[in-house]
Amino acid sequence: AGALDGGALTAVTDAAAALALAPVDAAVDAPLATIVDWPVPWPAERERLMLAYRRLHSDPAATDLTITPRMIVLHYTGGHSAKGTHGYFSRTRIEAERATLRKGGEAGVVSHFLVDRDGTIFRLIPETRMGRHAIGVNHAAIGVENVGDGDRYPLTDAQVAANVALIRDLAARFPIERVLGHHEVATLRGTPAYLELVRGYRNEKGDPGPRFMAAVRAGLG
C-alpha cells in the first residue's frame, strides 16, 4: 500500500473538531471491519498487574478490568513489524528501560487492535478489557495501533481505510463519543473524560499525527 498523499490531507487545528467524533453512520450499508483475532498472552499475573494499575490510576474500588468503551484512541507503533509489535505487547511486565511509565505500575502496555501496513486488523485483547495505551483515558478507551511511524514507515492508505472501517464497526457496537489521536489526548485534561488519580503522571505524545487523523476523519465523513 502506498504512503499517504500529504497534499490531499488537511491538518486538524481546531481543538473542538479534533476532539469531537463526527456522527458515525452505523447504518447497514456502512463498511464494517474484518477482524482477525491474534490474542496476546494474558496470564493470571498480567491480570493482577493490570488490576493494580486500574486501582491506582482510575478506580480504587475496581474488582475487574471490564470497561465501557466511550472513545477510540489511534496510535502508531514506531516500527515496521506487526509481529514485533505483537511480541512487545505480549510482555506481562513493562521493561525497566521505560522508567517513567514503570513508576505508574509494572503491567505491560497493550492496545486492543493492531493494524498492519496492508490494512489487516488484528484484535489483541477484547474491546471491553482495560488496556494500557493512553494515560488518562484507559478506563474508557479502545486503543488502535498502526504499524509504522511518521517518517521511516509512513502510515498507508490501506491503514486509513482499515481504521475508518474499524471505527464504524466499534461505533455500531459501543457508545463511542470520541475518536482521538494519541497526540490529542492531552487536550482532554481537566475534562470529565480524562481520569488520572496519580498526580503528575502524564506524558506528551506525537502519534499518529494530524495528517493521519485528518485522513481518517475525512473517511468517516
Image (tube, rainbow, N blue to C red):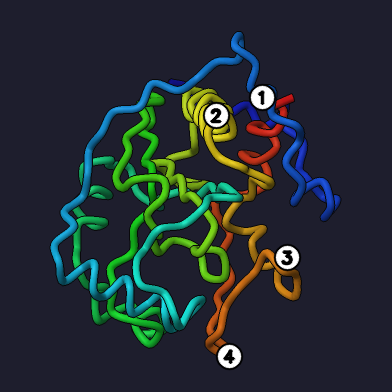
| Residue 104 placement (x, y as % from top left) | 40, 83
Q: Which mark is residue 219?
A: 1
Say which of 47 and 63 sits in front: 63
Q: Residue furthest bottom?
A: 199
Contact between marks 2 and 4 (CB within 8 A): the answer is: no
Residue matched to label 2: 160
| Residue 47 placement (x, y as % from top left) | 24, 67
Element carrying mark 2? helix
| Residue 54 placement (x, y as % from top left) | 41, 74
Callout 4 environment at 10 Å: few (<14), some (14 to 19), or many (20+)?
few
| C-alpha span from label 1 to label 4 | 37 Å
| C-alpha span from label 3 to label 1 | 23 Å
Which is nearer the N-term, disc 2 or disc 3?
A: 2
Residue matched to label 4: 199
Q: Nearer the viewer, mark 1 or mark 4?
A: 4
Element carrying mark 3? helix
Contact between marks 2 and 3 (CB within 8 A): the answer is: no
| Figure quadrant of residue 160 | top right
| Residue type at the position of mark 2 | Val
| Residue type at the position of mark 4 | Arg
Residue matched to label 3: 187
| C-alpha span from label 2 to label 3 | 23 Å
| Figure quadrant of residue 183 | bottom right
Contact between marks 1 and 2 (CB within 8 A): the answer is: yes
In the image, taking residue 36 as reference, residue 45 lies left or right, namely left
| C-alpha span from label 2 to label 4 | 35 Å
